[in-house]
Amino acid sequence: MSECVIPTLTSNEVVASKSVLPGDWQADFANLKALDLTLPVLELLRRTTSRLPQDVIDAIVKGRDAEEEGSRAFNTLNDMVRNINLADGQVTPLCQDTGSVIFWVRHPYGLSQRAARKQIREAVVQATKKVWLRPNCVESLSGKNSGTNMDPFHEHHPAIHFEEWDKPGLEIAVMLKGGGCENVGAQYRLPDAALGAGRDIKGVRKCIIDAVVKAQGQGCSPGILGVAIGGDRVTGYEKSKELILRKLGTANADPKMDAFEKDVTNDLNTLGIGPMGYGGNTTALGIHIEEMYRHPASFYVSISYMCWSSRRLALSIGSNGSVSFD
Amino acid sequence: MIRLTTPITEDQIRTLKVGDEVLLNGRVVLSRDIGHKFMKEQKPEWLKPILENMVIYHCGPVVRKNADGTWTFIAAGPTTSIREEPYQADVIETYKVRGVIGKGGMGKKTSEGLQKTGAVYLHATGGAGSLLAERVKRVVDVKMLEEFGSPEAFWIIEVEDFPLVVTMDSHGGSLHEIVLQQSQERAKALMG
């Protein structure tokens, strides 16, 4: 079981051939009222649930190759690559926990958010029927599963963040975030006497290390972390989650923060937690950190933990109406 | 590599040690959050013959219903086990369960339950949903599907060479405890 498994994702042509979106599908931005996003979003979900982004695969392979061949860490990362190949080839969910479904929609002036919400919800219902998504929406107290991934009354699931932008085109990013990794997210309020963490970058570092030690393998390590410094209890967590959308290996725009990210990642990989908490050198695939403004009295460090199966993808519709996925 | 087939005897389980790699065959029963609360609080008699000397799997699968009424597992990796910590030891003892499959490991109370009854905790690779679904050969039956919903129902399945690692044994050994302590020590050093 210890031979190196090579990632063998199907070609873009094969992916396109299985698309639920007709090849000649085009958006007409001159007539935004008639725009129907249901099929493009359904295709977005199909790809996201079964195919990991290349940067995540590269990071997993890099981690595997840095582990001792035949070790439990090596074998586990190897199994992850096997799983990536299988899910992509079969177009089946990478993980049975297809997560909470979270969208970020950036759209031009004139798009009806109510209409878009309805279409996106319909795409999620259809993806659930096609078994690309598991029904993951249960009533809190009774535990009753709605069966459709819909929160029928309050429309809190799927979560959809809308933002109007200046550009003529439209972008929809999605993240499928499993419950195990969501559960190990953490929010700290500095100063934290127990940690000995003050209101400075050293304090932030302590929070990150503490959260990863507490998470152990339970968030399906190696993880990808989004960390927001500042904000409030809501905006901090919101930002930390959005930071997971950034591609691994891309630099933070702030050079100091970029150096800090690399430094902390190296530290985390000396903790010995390893893939699935079995021990090893691959505990974190990357960290993305951003600073926000805050109230003078509050200093939050909000940490979102994403599992190794970081399922995220963005659909772009250019001003000419053509669709692309990245 | 050790091949095990359910039902498993207490003697077989007592020979297993932390770090052993196991290929599991035979019947396995899925249960997670609502199921564990239900088993501890209601202790239904009808589950006893289903669980005795068997293995529980913490998993909420993606399942397809076929045209002929049968079911197929599409993705079936483990869910985080620690949520069942308040229930697991009782469940193991009440139903004489010999193994629990999950991810992330469990705590002291479960470890004591494993030692007392003679059972092990078996770790599967989290997120390997497609890979593990391939090893599910047949869905035998499902209980409480209507009440609990498909991710939480008691699915009874047959597995073939299901790849697992013993990370908690029936002698008090726990790989999770070792990794936790080592990482806490390292974190202390890093934090200065």
Image: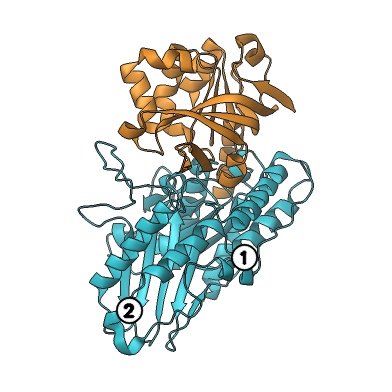
Q: Colour of chain A?
A: cyan
The one nearer the camera, A270 or A303, is: A303
User: Residue A155 shows which numbered tag?
Assistant: none
The residue to which callout 2 is attached is: A35
Q: Find residue A55 and report its horizontal and vertical position in percent.
A: 61, 65
- Whole-number angstrom distance, CA of label 2 to CA of label 1: 30 Å
Q: In this rendering, which labeled residue sits more in front, label 2 or label 1?
A: 2
Q: Colour of chain B?
A: orange
Q: Are marks 2 and 1 in contact (CB under 8 Å)?
A: no
Above or below for B116 versus B32: above
User: Could you classify mark 1 by the number of other residues whose Cα lies within 10 Å: few (under 14), some (14-19), or many (20 or more)?
Assistant: some
| Labels 2 and 1: the sequence-earlier one | 2
Marks 2/1 same chain: yes
The residue to which callout 1 is attached is: A54
SS for tag 1? helix
Q: Find residue A136 and report its horizontal and vertical position in percent.
A: 37, 47
Q: Find residue A75 and report its horizontal and vertical position in percent.
A: 71, 43
